[in-house]
Image: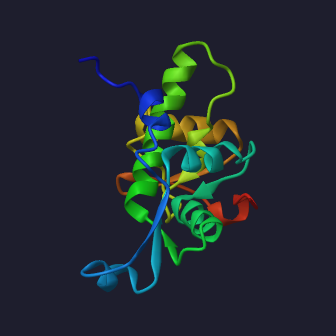
């Protein structure tokens, strides 16, 4: 069997999106209501809309998804995983010569930190972010965009 590549994983919706009631142990962490489990391409489409010089956080992506699907929250687990898949699919496409790929480096963790799981690690995201005019600071082992809230995109 052939190994599935990143672009394939991005396009494989697995029957998603779907909205489910928050039940059991999840109510402790997420409260009550409904959660939308997005399709990978939905996360990618939001990431693609972030213009040069602007940023978005995973929590903002989750809020956009929740609003779109009339859910209480967007799933933090799958949204984060699908942002990661989007980043690697963009690098794969770039390697295949595609020009207009998803600018994944504009998507930050909720606290404004860079994502070390993206291609090139936090160092790679730092370099791409600095090219777009963002000031990156280091706290311990993590990198953060200084005053990232001022650069958030209005999507």
The picture places residue 129, in percent across and down from the top left corner, at 61, 42
The type of colouring in the image is rainbow
**Residue visible at 53% across and 66% down?**
59
Q: Look at the image and tell me whether residue 32 can be seen.
A: yes
From the viewer's perspective, is residue 99 above or below residue 31?
A: above
Horizontal side of residue 87 vs 52, given as left or right: left
Q: Residue at x 59, y 64 (%)?
A: 60
Q: Position of residue 135 (x, y in %)?
A: 63, 50
| Residue 40 point in image, percent of width and height | 49, 46
* Quarter holding residue 44: top right
User: 82 or 35: nearer the eye?
Assistant: 35
The residue under the point 35% across, 52% down is 141
Q: Which residue is painted at 53% across and 60% down in the image?
A: 112
Which is more toward the observer, 91 or 16? Answer: 16
Q: Is residue 144 above or below residue 149?
A: above
Residue 44 in the figure: left or right of residue 38: right
Quarter assignment of residue 26: bottom left
- The quadrant of the image that shows the C terminus is bottom right
Q: Quadrant of the N terminus?
A: top left
């Amino acid at each position: 069997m052939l190994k599935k590549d990143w672009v394939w994983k991005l396009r494989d919706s697995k029957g998603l999106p779907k909205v489910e009631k928050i039940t059991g142990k999840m109510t402790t962490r997420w409260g009550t209501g409904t959660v939308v489990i997005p399709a990978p391409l939905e996360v990618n489409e939001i990431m693609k809309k972030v213009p040069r010089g602007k940023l978005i956080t995973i929590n903002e992506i989750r809020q956009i998804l929740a609003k779109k699907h009339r859910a209480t929250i967007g799933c933090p687990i799958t949204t984060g995983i699908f942002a990661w898949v989007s980043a690697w699919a963009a690098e794969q496409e770039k390697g295949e010569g595609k020009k207009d790929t998803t600018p994944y480096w504009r998507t930050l963790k909720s606290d404004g930190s860079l994502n070390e799981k993206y291609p090139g690690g936090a160092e790679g995201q730092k370099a791409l972010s600095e090219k777009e005019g963002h000031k990156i600071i280091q706290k311990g082992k993590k990198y953060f965009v200084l005053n990232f809230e001022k650069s958030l995109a209005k999507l």
